[in-house]
Amino acid sequence: EPEVTQTPSHQVTQMGQEVILRCVPISNHLYFYWYRQILGQKVEFLVSFYNNEISEKSEIFDDQFSVERPDGSNFTLKIRSTKLEDSAMYFCASTDGGGWGRVYEQYFGPGTRLTVT
Amino acid sequence: RKEVEQDPGPFNVPEGATVAFNCTYSNSASQSFFWYRQDCRKEPKLLMSVYSSGNEDGRFTAQLNRASQYISLLIRDSKLSDSAIYLCVVDKGGGFKTIFGAGTRLFVKA
């Protein structure tokens, strides 16, 4: 069964450093998402991406964050100048469709646990 | 009113019990509705989409009431393996953003 993969599974970084979280979505999927989940809290939408551009982003997704699809398979989230409060689990998700304002079923990767010290 | 609101639980039920979870959403323009489950420190896994006509998948039944902006999930004949957090997910209406509820925790005991 096709699955979304994410690397690394755990990333430890020092405050102020830049990190890149990597995701490989399911191969025929077209819409990609990043979410974060702070320990003990709910899953929060960060950004959606389609056709090589951001479709929608949340208030959390400020200039500190960026996304990229550098090739036909990877989808990355870059966090610049990390802060302690960026410590969270970051999930990537993908879906094979969408449109007319409707979100299709999303399939999630196993997540990257980011720890900022 | 929260965008997506769920009863946090926890629900503690014996094996074989029937349990129902409720979820309300605030945006009447929302069009996509889902139930996911999340095990401890794992990713959300799609349980089922929710349609106006209601849908069933084995022991799981989901219902949507657009007029009341309410979604439900019914689990029949609970198994130990059903123990998890159940997440109600709704799109924000007119875009590619999804909003997760805080989840309802279920414990099924032998």
Image (spheres, rainbow, N blue to C red):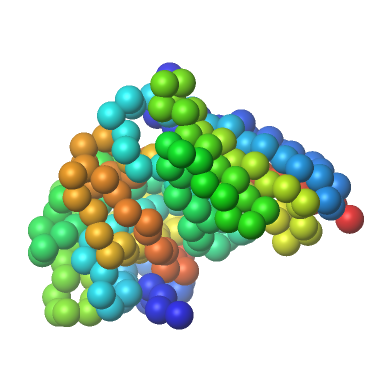
Is residue B63 something that shows in the picture? yes
Residue A82 or residue B47, whichever sits in front: B47
Location of residue B59 with respect to B95 vertically, above or below: below
Location of residue B87 with respect to B72 vertically, above or below: below
Residue B61 or residue B29, whichever sits in front: B61
In terms of image quadrants, where is residue B18?
top right
In terms of image quadrants, where is residue A104?
bottom left
Where is residue B49? Give x, y as percent: 45, 50
Which residue corresponds to the image point at 72% horizontal and 40% vertical from the top-left?
Answer: B19
Quarter the N terminus of chain B occupies: top left
B34 left or right, relative to B86: left
Where is residue A83? Give x, y as percent: 33, 52
Quarter the C terminus of chain B occupies: bottom right
Which residue corresponds to the image point at 32% horizontal and 38% vertical from the top-left?
Answer: B31
Residue A14 or residue A114, whichever sits in front: A114
Query: Seen from this angle, which residue lies furthest right?
Result: B110
Is residue A8 something that shows in the picture? no
B50 left or right, relative to A71: right
Where is residue B100? Give x, y as percent: 43, 42
The count of marks equals 0
Which residue corresponds to the image point at 41% horizontal and 64% vertical from the top-left?
Answer: A108
Where is residue B33? Give x, y as percent: 41, 42
Which residue corresponds to the image point at 83% horizontal and 51% vertical from the top-left?
Answer: B16
